[in-house]
Amino acid sequence: MTVATRPLSMTVNNRKVGPVDVPDDLMMIDFLHEYLSLTGSRLGCGQGICHACAIILDGPEGSSREIRSCITGAHFFEGKSIRTVEAHAERDANGDVVRLSAIQRAFVERFSFQCGYCTPGFVTGATVLVEHLKEKPVRRADVERTIEQALAQHICRCTGYVRYYEAVRDVILSTPGLVRG
């Protein structure tokens, strides 16, 4: 028995990948883990419910959106550009982390995570939210609701979400241009 494959090319974390022969039915999370050794995105539920596997799909016009990699086939990303949780921190020429993103720093400062399994998905979701707010700031009175709407589908079994939401609120309120009024 042979597995049907076809070539896949994309941009991952600002690096061209491919063409690589990939099975037709391979999920993106498996491609990231098995082909690129990018294991930061977590396989939680395997059904797209928990969002631990979230990655960012960057649109050609500069938009970004969260995609669940456990239920999205790798070939969906043909020719597209994505970012994984490994791309959020600033790295030096050797690939060593030199500075965490604002979201990552806030999560550490607030000790937002306990076991940390869901944290990559929360980092990704919060990053997309902040990027969207740069384009369309939210009213100060709507910050809490905006965070809840953006992160509501992320599941955490340890912390009860309060610290994640507080950390995201801190970043939003302290970053110029994300809040109006």
Image (cartoon, helix red, strand yellow):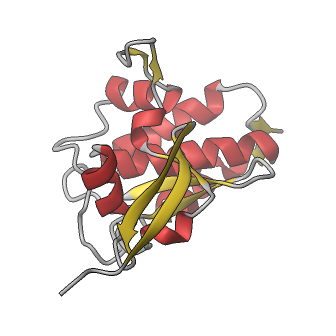
Residue at the extreme bottom of the image, as rendered:
1
* Quarter placement of the C terminus: top right
Q: Is residue 10 left or right of residue 165?
A: right
* Quarter placement of the N terminus: bottom left
Write down the quadrant of residue 27 in the picture.
bottom left
Q: Is residue 14 left or right of residue 54?
A: right
Residue at 70% x, 48% y is 132
Name the spot of residue 23 as percent of width and height, x first. 34, 73
Name the spot of residue 71 as percent of width and height, x first. 39, 75
- Tell me if residue 90 comes above or below residue 173 in the rendering: above
Name the spot of residue 25 as percent of width and height, x first. 36, 79
- Tell me if residue 91 comes above or below residue 8 in the rendering: above
Name the spot of residue 33 as percent of width and height, x first. 27, 52
Q: Is residue 7 left or right of residue 120?
A: right
Q: Is residue 41 visible?
A: no
Write down the quadrant of residue 95 in the picture.
top left
Residue at 48% x, 58% y is 151
| Nearer to us in this view, 104 or 141 | 104
| Nearer to us in this view, 12 or 64 | 12
Residue at the extreme front of the image, as rendered:
1
